[in-house]
Amino acid sequence: MINNNVLIIAEAGVNHNGELSLAFELVDKAAESGADYIKFQTFKADNLATKDVKKAQYQLTSGSVYETQYQMLKRLELNNEMHQKLIHRCSEKKIGFLSSGFDIKSIDYLIELNVPIIKVPSGEITNLPYLRHIGRLGKEILISTGMSTISEIESAINILIHSGSKKESITVLHCNSDYPTPMNDVNLLAMKSMSDIFGVKVGYSDHTNGIEVPIAAVALGASVIEKHFTIDKNLVGPDHQASLEPHELCFMVSSIRNIEKALGSDLKQPSKSEEKNKMVVRKSIVASKPIKMGELFSEKNLTVKRPGNGISPMLWDEVLGTKSNQNYQKDELIFL
């Protein structure tokens, strides 16, 4: 479930190419990376697209250019037996299983499989009956917001809440639905705006090349990161080229975990690791030349040097004009 740490979802999506053996390999690599979950996609092409709908521009690398989106989706379906085998594999590898359900029947099937988090894909954010159904389920919900306006996101959140979802169970993921997303279209600051506007948890579903943006999203407050990955970017399929390879996924996960540690708290104070350096790098008031007992301290016989275990230079004005109570050699620490 969603906890205080950043939830990292390794998005396999349809990068299994309809092959169970490739899906198993994706599970294994996601587990090795340290991600919290691997996520697939659950759909029936007959319930998802009409038979003559064209592919999106980025999907043209998948199969024949004459192939319809329906035909492509049909090749990429996971049947019930494959779902069950993947869940078993995830259990063996100690990584959580998630899947995006693209229609009501698929959502119900995922509920039967005890999937702990429901993911609303970007394309379903304007699907009223679908959103109402999910809102009644009482589950943690992730909503991707690619191609969406603020008003559309607000409507989707309100539908979920009015249908029974608790606001605190909803996490809104900033997203851009171009694969790969150009850097100047990421608009990452919109993630924080959604948190401020809607008062919900936010995260980021990334389709850029590389790992810089999801890491930056964590620094900006993302509680969930979702990132596509593949076994090989050169495989034929709609999402492979905009996905990380396993070694890149590992680096992203370790980088995010380091950023979590680095963020710390909003309280500025010396850390334990730097306390030991304070005495040797700060300075104290010392004699700039020999000083006799009874002589007045002045700018002519005092200076400031390391170490910092004497009188702080912040007390400079209080020291000036007082009498020396002993003799001092040059560079000796001054005491009152």
Image (cartoon, rainbow, N blue to C red):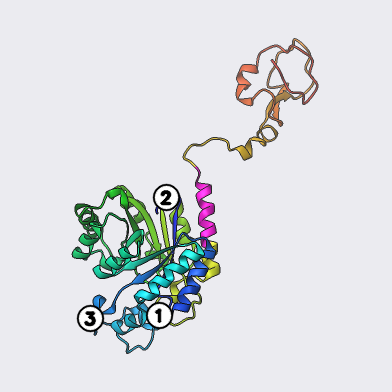
Quarter placement of the C terminus: top right
Q: Position of residue 96 (x, y in %)?
A: 44, 61
SS of the residue under disc 2: loop
Q: Position of residue 51 (x, y in %)?
A: 24, 84
Find out whether the residues at labels 2 and 1 contact each other: C-beta distance under 8 Å: no
**Alpha carbons under labels 2 and 3: distance apart:** 39 Å
Which mark's residue is nearer the viewer, 2 or 3? 2
**Alpha carbons under labels 1 and 3: distance apart:** 20 Å
Query: Residue 272 is drawn in which quadrant?
Result: top right
Nearest to the observer: residue 57 or residue 53: 53
82 horizontally vs 314: left or right: left
- The answer to whether residue 54 shows anywhere in this view is yes
Which amino acid, mark 3? Thr
Q: Earlier in the sequence, mark 2 or mark 3?
A: 2
The reply to whether the magenta stretch includes residue 255 is: yes
Can you identify the residue that label 3 sits on?
A: 50
* Residue numbers of the magenta segment: 252-264
Q: Residue at 77% of width from left, 26% of height from top?
A: 331
- The answer to whether residue 103 shows anywhere in this view is no
Q: Residues within 10 Å of mark 1 (few under 14, many from 20)?
A: some
Nearest to the observer: residue 224 or residue 317: 224
Query: Residue 38 is drawn in which quadrant?
Result: bottom left
Which amino acid, mark 2? Asn
Q: Residue at 36% of width from left, 53% of height from top?
A: 202
Can you identify the residue that label 2 sits on?
A: 3
Q: Position of residue 170 (x, y in %)?
A: 31, 53
Can you identify the residue that label 1 sits on?
A: 18
Rendered view: 296 above or below 56: above
